[in-house]
Image (cartoon, rainbow, N blue to C red):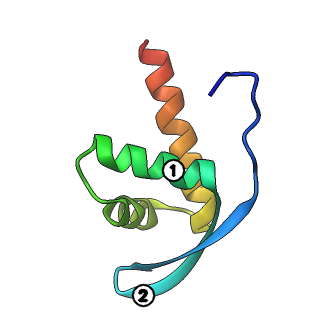
Amino acid sequence: MAPDVVPKSTVVKHSVYIRGQKTSISLEDVFWDALGEIASERNITRKDLLEEVDQKRDGNLSSALRVFALHYYRTQAKRK
């Protein structure tokens, strides 16, 4: 996607099980896809990544996942 293109920002609810508990996560598709890509790069499942972020989070899980994805890609960009 070109840097000047703003992706659609519709929030979608995803029902997931985290550490045996069913919960819903409200995320834009771009973040959901990014978490899948990050998990794939780390050779883990998206579920494993969600659980990892959940264990380390402070506050709302959906927000923590957005911050995690942003931090991940900002760190990657600084390495280039």
Q: Name the residue carrying label 2.
A: 21
21 vs 39: above or below: below
73 vs 38: above or below: above
User: Mark 2: which secondary structure?
Assistant: strand
Q: Quadrant of residue 38?
A: top left
Report the residue at 50% width, 20% height from top. 77
Q: Left or right of 57: which side holds 48?
A: left
Q: Nearer the viewer, mark 1 or mark 2?
A: 1
**Residue 47 image point, x, y percent:** 36, 66
Q: Real-space Cα distance between discs 1 and 2?
A: 22 Å
Q: Which mark is residue 15?
A: none
Q: Left or right of 39: which side holds 35?
A: right
Q: Quadrant of residue 70?
A: top right
Which of pointers 1 and 2 lies earlier in the amino acid sequence?
Answer: 2
**Residue 60 image point, x, y percent:** 62, 68
Q: Name the residue carrying label 1.
A: 33
Q: Nearer the viewer, residue 52 or 6?
A: 6
Q: Amino acid at mark 1?
A: Asp
Farthest residue in the bottom direction? 21
30 vs 47: above or below: above
Q: Amino acid at mark 2?
A: Gln
